[in-house]
Structures are given as structure tokens and as C-alpha cells.
Amino acid sequence: MKKPTVITILGATGSIGLNTLDVIGRHPDDFQLFAVTAHSRIDELLSICKRFQPLYAVVGSQAAAETLQTKLQEQHIATEVLFGEAALVDVSEASEVDTVMAAIVGAAGLLPTLAAVKAGKRVLLANKEALVMSGQLFIDAVRESNAQLLPVDSEHNAIFQALPTAVQHNSVSTDFAAHGIAKILLTGSGGPFRETPLADLATQTPAAACAHPNWDMGQKISVDSATMMNKGLEYIEARWLFNCQPQHIEVVLHPQSVIHSMVQYVDGSVIAQLGQPDMRTPIAYCLGYPERLASGVANLDFANMGALTFGQADAARYPCLQLAIDACWHGQAATTALNAANEIAVAAFLQGNIQFGDIAKICESVLTQADMPAITSIEAVLDCDANARRIARSLIPRGQ
Ligand code: NDP
Ligand code: MG
């Protein structure tokens, strides 16, 4: 019998984390949970520990760790609870671990994800912000350690699936010309405000921004989808994951989210991956790669699907998308600063401290005001990130 894959799930209590556990739960003999991590949703983590009995659980603070450890002991569950950033790194690079699901949201995921990469793990990358922040350094680490990077993000997973097998083995070094690849077509639905009158956009509420028409996701990525900053971050993510030049990526609006992205070849062929808007499909693909695992996702119903439509993203409606594309080719400091500014602005928007329309304005101002030094170390990434956050906070009323 095949040895089970030993896996750590970073961000187990989130939307991606819970979907990963759902798929793993369908294949109990194939996976063994080494560690699960959360930040503050301790009761969620307790339920996960009860069901999956991981060796370790990691939380954000000592107090949360003590609370969880006591509850686990009361229920005779042997999981050991750790806390803090160093513990996140430890459970990512531990020698027993084969695979790390990187599903912490935002910059907090950078160091543990990078630790998994440096330790040469199979890394299932959901945390796009880590790659946006550290780009070349991250990819250099993948090349040096021979880690296997598998994209969980549905678009990048679709692109990965549509690439030739020879390219999949080392997608971070994709040679477009050698494999007859013309370009990547990155699809995006346009989010909940695709048809909202432009005059009403600036004042949309957090609840409306989080109500994505097709996908059920965490709050931060839902707001990013409404601004299309998510597509911008994905553009930067694609650039690094597939070794792209500017002519190699095009964003295509596709409101139905049935096609998850495509690869166009020089002979005119376009290969697309289709599926339900359910993250369990790309997650199962990454968990099983190169084999296919059942994911619990229903088949597409072509008989009743209706029309699939395509278009172009409107620059006036989605200023964040263009900011991200410009930052992508400007350099590492620009994408790091943009990501930091966006995290601060989105958090302030969710807390009701700024308007929807201010997110793009804050990101743009930070890009204008921040220093743009050459970045050659993770310390420099973290400095640039901290500096951009300072500037972004200074632009938010009530000092958020
Ligand atoms: P969620 O907000 O649902 O979950 C985030 C996870 O990260 C939770 O487990 C949370 O813990 C943990 N976390 C939050 N802050 C910290 C911190 N400071 N330190 C350690 N852990 C932390 O996010 P999603 O699951 O939606 O997204 C996760 C990542 O995957 C993001 O980078 C997103 O862009 C990407 N992604 C998500 C998709 C989706 O469909 N959801 C699709 C494609 C990519 P706690 O629960 O305790 O707060
Ligand atoms: Mg995506």
C-alpha cells in the first residue's frame, strides 16, 4: 500500500483550509495530518483536531494556545499546541512533512511558506500574497531547493493543467518559445460590481463587496475580487509561477467563472480548464498530482449552463487591476508596497473606516510616496512592506 502523504495545513480554519480538509476527509488512507494552524478561530481549530487528530496545532498567542491545549486534554486528544511565528515555520519545514498547503491569508503567510519552499517540500500555494511580496527571491528559493510548487489559485491551477507535461515539471522556468506557448489568458469574473453604475461604485458597502456572484471565499479576497485587485495580484502571481514576460499574459473578463483560465499556443489552439467555481477541484488536483482525486464537486451541467461570455476589464471600473499590472513590471518594491497598501486599505474598508472607492486611491498614493529600493533579501522585503503599511495607515482617517 502507498505510504500516506504527511501534510501541514497553514491556515486550516480559513476557506481554503476547510476545503482542503474536506477533500482530505474523503481520502483518509492517503493523508496524515502533521499540523494545522489558525490565528484566532480556536473553536474551529478544536473541531478540526477532534476530527483529524493532527500531531500539532499552531495558534497566534500563548493565551490561545493554553485555552486550546486545555480543551484538547479534556477531550483526551493528544494534539500538541504551539504558538507564534516560529512555530508556523517549524511545522512547515519539519523533516516528517511531505506537503505544505500554504493557505494563510496575506503577508503573514510569507515566512512559513518560504520555509516550506526552502526545505524542498511540495508546496500547494494558495497564499498569493507571499509570491507577490517576494517574487524573484521566492522563485530562486524554489529553484535552489527543488521544491515542487503547485498552484492552488483556480486560475493558475487551470493554466498549470493546460500546460504541456514537460513544462509542469518545472513551471517556474517555463520557456514559452520552446514549447510553442503564445500566452496565458487569465480569466476573471469582474466581481459583484461588474454592472453597478460607475457613479455608485465608490460607496458600496463591505457586505455588498463580499457577496461574490460565483465564489464563496474569505473576506479579504472577496473585497480584492470586487476591486479586481485580486486579478492584479494573480497577474503578478502568474508572472512568477510561469516565468512570463509582459506579452505572455492577458486578462479576459468571463462573468460565469466556468472557464478558470486558458493557455494559447502559437498554432492558434487555446486549451482551457473548466469546472464548477468550487476550490475543492484545484485543491484535489494539487493534493493528488499527478493523479486525480475525487473532490466531492458536482459535474458541470452543460445542458443547462447557458451562454459563456467574454470581454475586457474596464479600466475606469477597476483601477486596482492596472495599478497591479504596472507594479508587476516596475519591480519588486512596487509589488510589495502595493500588496501592503492593499491589505491595510481592505482592512480599513471592512472596518467601515474608508469607502470602497478609497482602496484604489490609497494604493496609488502609497505607490507614489514609497521608496522603491532594489530588493535583494527577505529583510528588504519586510522593510518595504512595513514602510508601505506606515504610509497607508497615515492616509486612513482615525489612524487605522
Ligand atoms: P480566510 O480568511 O478564510 O482564512 C485565512 C486563514 O489564515 C485562517 O486560517 C486564519 O486563521 C489564518 N490567518 C489569518 N491571519 C493570520 C496571521 N496573522 N497569522 C497566521 N494565520 C493567520 O482566507 P482564504 O482561505 O479565503 O484565503 C487564504 C489564501 O488563499 C489567501 O492568500 C487567498 O488570496 C488565497 N486564495 C483563496 C481562495 C478562496 O477561494 N478562498 C481562492 C484562491 C486563493 P483564523 O481562522 O484563526 O483567523
Ligand atoms: Mg483566483
Image (tube, rainbow, N blue to C red):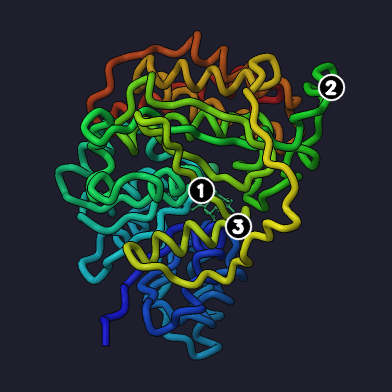
Q: Nearer the viewer, residue 274 or 383?
A: 274
Q: Is mark 2 on a helix, strand or loop?
A: loop
Q: Is mark 3 within 8 Å of ligand 1?
A: no
Can residue 61 be seen at all in this image of the molecule? no
Q: Mark 3 points at which residue?
A: 278
| Quadrant (top left/top right/bottom left/bottom right) for the N terminus | bottom left
Above or below — where is 133 with respect to 217?
above
- Give the image location of residue 221, x and y in percent: 60, 42
- The circle drawn on residue 197 is 2
- The circle drawn on residue 154 is 1
Q: Which residue is drawn at 41% across and 21% down?
A: 328
Q: Which of 207 and 234 is in front in this view?
A: 234
Q: How many labels does the image show?
A: 3
Residue count near mark 1 (Cα–Cα under 10 Å), binned few <14, some 14–19, many ≥20 = many
Pick whichever of labels 1 and 3 is earlier in the sequence.
Answer: 1
Q: Is mark 1 within 8 Å of ligand 2?
A: yes
Q: In which image quadrant can residue 293 be found? A: bottom left
Q: Which residue lies furthest to the bottom in this view?
A: 76
- Could you tell me how far apart the alpha carbons at marks 1 and 3 are, in whole angstroms? 9 Å
